[in-house]
Amino acid sequence: MEKNRVLPVSHAIVFLLIHLGTGLAAPVLSLMLLARGATLATLPFVVGVTTVVTCLLEVPSGIAADVLGRRRVFALSMALQVATYVVLLATPSLAVVAVSGLLRGLALAARTGTLEAVELDRVVAGHPEAAGRLAALDALNGRLALLESAGVGAGAIAGGVLAMLDPSYVLLIGCIIASGAAALAGGLALFPPDERSSVPVCERLRSTLADMRATLARPGDIRLVLAASASAGVVMVVVETYWQLAFESLVGEGGTWLLGFVNCAGMGAAALGSAAAMRWGSAASGAHGRRGLYLALQAAAIVCLALFSAAASVPVFVAVYVALYLALGARSVIEQTVLHNAVPSRERSGMASVQSIALRAGGLAGSAASGPAVAALTLAGAWPVLAALAAVLAALGARRRSLTGCVRD
């Protein structure tokens, strides 16, 4: 009976464990690295190593998952994650945290689009009719998003407590290793083995690369998603960089303690948006309706970014912040449905990695533009300008999409 579920419970537990490990480290990662050998001067270098490695290997690792097998690459990614924290148990030094940062980058790159692709393939194969397939994709993507929110949120709370109990972070590191090992064991035990192929690896690789180039060359939903992902990257990086400063300017230094509650409200709104998207997607009419919903949610997030300039009181600021994350949570679910309804199974992991790179590229564009914009216009004046940048990126994808016929409608 479990096989007939959109997401089997046993598989959901594996995803929860994966995100739990991420959440455990998230709130105290910099502090952990400082305690294990980094300094304030070397911390940016260590974080930079992780970022560069992840960006360089994101797409190659996704292609490797398509060619060599999703479960196999997932196992490698979780083994690398466990190794990341095992290394941190060594005698604290810069070399220890540098090697750990390198392994973390490898793990993050290899992790993208592995077990999720297995689930997406299963759902697509089980729903050959377009309407049923789209509804099932909405349901699956919504559940995956909710599991991520739950796992990261629970892990963040536990990570903060464990860090307080043990300032050396050994206890926390041990728990992260345990969650990673459990996710690795669960993935290997519960997910089906990768199919064996008689075609040589080099030939499969050439074929996959050729297919991906052809897919990216065609205007359509995939290009739309890539442009909208870059736009969303601008929105998310700008907000995460500046919202605390903007909020503090409204409440004063004495209200800094409210930041955690506002952040928690945003996380809750994102989870609510993910849940709502499953219903909104079902109410939309076919692929065309979901595409329209996707663009509407993207536009809503951009409008919220611009509205921060008019948020002159704490209640208004919090309302805009919550609305923004409600839109972001919903659009991420619909985005995955639009993308994976258009992507062939043989390219699924690779295209998931390409989409992740588009999101990161948008974030880099937002970071590059925000500094000069804030310096020239102040933060209040920069919000609409940065929103305009996000709108331009989204409009490029929407315009390209409008010039072509519908894909898989």
Image: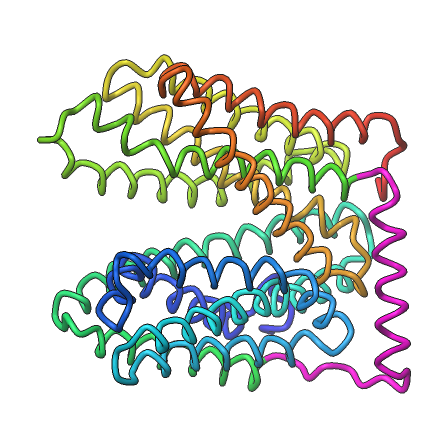
Q: Which residue is drawn at the image coordinates 36% and 44% (left, top)?
A: 267
Q: Which residue is drawn at the image coordinates 90% and 52% (left, top)?
A: 214
Q: Which residue is drawn at the image coordinates 30% and 39% (left, top)?
A: 265
Q: What is the x, y in percent for residue 32?
A: 26, 66
Task: Give, as a single range, the part of the protein colored magenta.
Answer: 191-220
**Quadrant of residue 400 in the image?**
top right
Q: What is the x, y in percent for residue 85?
A: 37, 77
User: Number of numbered discs present?
Assistant: 0
Tell me the quarter of the image containing the C terminus.
top right
Q: Is residue 215 magenta?
A: yes
In the displayed structure, does residue 382 sit left or right of residue 289? Answer: left
In the displayed structure, does residue 408 sit left or right of residue 108? Answer: right
Residue in the foreground of this view, choosing between 164 and 35: 35
Q: On screen, 104 above or below 68? A: above
Q: What is the x, y in percent for residue 337?
A: 67, 47
In the displayed structure, does residue 334 sit left or right of residue 268? Answer: right
Instruction: Spot the residue most to the front.
Output: 41
Instruction: Spot the residue most to the left.
Output: 254
**Quadrant of residue 124 in the image?**
bottom right
In the displayed structure, does residue 404 sit left or right of residue 99? Answer: right
Q: On screen, 268 above or below 54? A: above
Tell me the quarter of the image containing the N terminus.
bottom right
Q: On screen, 22 above or below 231? A: below
